[in-house]
Image: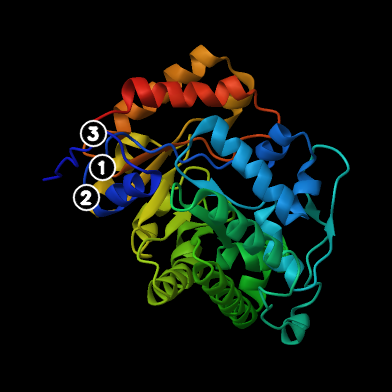
């Protein structure tokens, strides 16, 4: 039986701690992933923010002061960072688009032997993210958890080799694929150690594991054990709760996700939230339920409040739940994001 915290108001960290440990906070946490949208609020491009720790910290601080969300997510093009630190070229847009990888780094499997685990203090833009996190800690203290993303092992492997090539390699050269995923785990361990060592939290994001992109069988055989190893390593580094984030409908692989040791999983907008939440709760794992970010961008405030209320009505009972909306798009009107906060205040209290 979950017990209420009986607190009139909590810090964001206290709220999330309740979500992870299975007690009731004062209200449902608002876990907004604000990256390029913070650049929009600051009047700069995503590429400018992505390459400057001071700008990144100031933009995130401005977003936090406006929205008072319960979780700060550093970076912009977070899926590119490890690949760039390994030597991949990133193209930085002069407009409102986010940076993109020019091409996969590994044109041939033989290139894997030349790669070395990057140094988070020196390689690519990894030091920028760490610097921005430390700057925010200096300004905000323990008001709100500050998070940096570790790319999931399978997704990093797909970014380095190219997704279609990686899937073909699985049939033609499975030893190479296993070696590449193992290397990706080593990269994630080193990056996560640096994040946790800086006093930040590390989450894991996997963009390539949800069906139909990846079959449930391939997920269970290749991706799930690597995620489990990475999460166990973070626990050994002193982080007891690690979120594993993946978009799309992940119900077909939920049994595997629950075996990774993740403390929080994401029920993205396409998921059947009621089924997802029932299964995660029975396993003692928290859920972040997402409002569709396309609605956040293109709907109106009334529609967004109503969508958030529906998500809250399904996800809130019993606790172990947070409200999210995927990655908030760059051009989202601030009043649309504030509509989520209004829904939390109206319907997210326990």
The image quarter containing residue 238 is bottom left
| Residue under label 1 | 278
Residue 204 location (% of width, % of height): 51, 60
Residue 102 location (% of width, % of height): 84, 58
Label 1 packing within 10 angstroms: few (<14), some (14-19), many (20+): some
In the rendered image, is residue 128 in sight? Answer: yes
Residue 89 location (% of width, % of height): 84, 64
Label 3 to label 1: alpha-carbon separation = 10 Å
Label 2 to label 1: alpha-carbon separation = 6 Å
Name the residue: 37% across, 61% down: 241
The label on residue 346 is: none
Mark 3 and mark 2 lie on one chain; the one further toward the N terminus is 2
Q: Nearer the viewer, mark 3 or mark 1?
A: 3
Residue lying furthest left: 1
Name the residue: 56% across, 58% down: 148
The label on residue 282 is: 2
- Please identify the quadrant where the C terminus is shown: top left
- Please identify the quadrant where the N terminus is shown: top left
């Amino acid at each position: 039986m979950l017990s209420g915290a009986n607190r009139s108001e909590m810090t964001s960290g206290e709220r999330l701690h309740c979500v992870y440990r299975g007690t009731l906070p004062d209200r449902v946490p608002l876990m907004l992933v604000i990256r390029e949208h913070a650049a929009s609020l600051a009047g700069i491009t995503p590429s400018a923010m992505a390459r400057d720790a001071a700008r990144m910290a100031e933009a995130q601080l401005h977003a936090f002061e406006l929205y008072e969300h319960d979780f700060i997510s550093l970076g912009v093009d977070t899926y590119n960072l490890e690949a760039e630190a390994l030597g991949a070229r990133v193209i930085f847009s002069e407009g409102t688009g986010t940076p993109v990888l020019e091409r996969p780094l590994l044109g041939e499997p033989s290139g894997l032997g030349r790669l070395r685990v990057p140094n988070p203090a020196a390689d690519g833009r990894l030091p920028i993210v760490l610097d921005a996190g430390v700057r925010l800690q200096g300004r905000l203290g323990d008001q709100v958890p500050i998070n940096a993303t570790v790319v999931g092992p399978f997704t990093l492997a797909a970014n380095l080799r190219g997704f279609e090539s990686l899937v073909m390699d699985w049939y033609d050269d499975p030893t190479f694929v296993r070696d590449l995923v193992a290397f990706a785990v080593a990269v994630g361990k080193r990056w996560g150690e640096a994040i946790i060592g800086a006093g930040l939290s590390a989450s894991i994001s996997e963009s390539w594991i949800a069906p139909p992109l990846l079959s449930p069988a391939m997920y269970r055989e290749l991706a799930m054990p690597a995620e489990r190893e990475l999460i166990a390593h973070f626990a050994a580094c002193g982080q007891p709760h690690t979120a594993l984030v993946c978009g799309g409908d992940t119900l077909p692989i939920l049994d595997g996700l629950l075996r990774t040791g993740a403390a929080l999983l994401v029920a993205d907008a396409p998921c059947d939230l009621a089924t997802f939440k029932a299964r995660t709760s029975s396993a003692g794992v928290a859920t972040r339920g997402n409002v569709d970010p396309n609605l956040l961008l293109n709907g109106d405030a009334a529609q967004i409040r109503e969508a958030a209320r529906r998500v809250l009505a399904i996800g809130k009972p019993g606790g172990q739940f947070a409200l999210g909306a995927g990655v908030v798009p760059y051009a989202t009107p601030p009043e649309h994001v504030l509509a989520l906060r209004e829904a939390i205040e109206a319907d997210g209290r326990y």
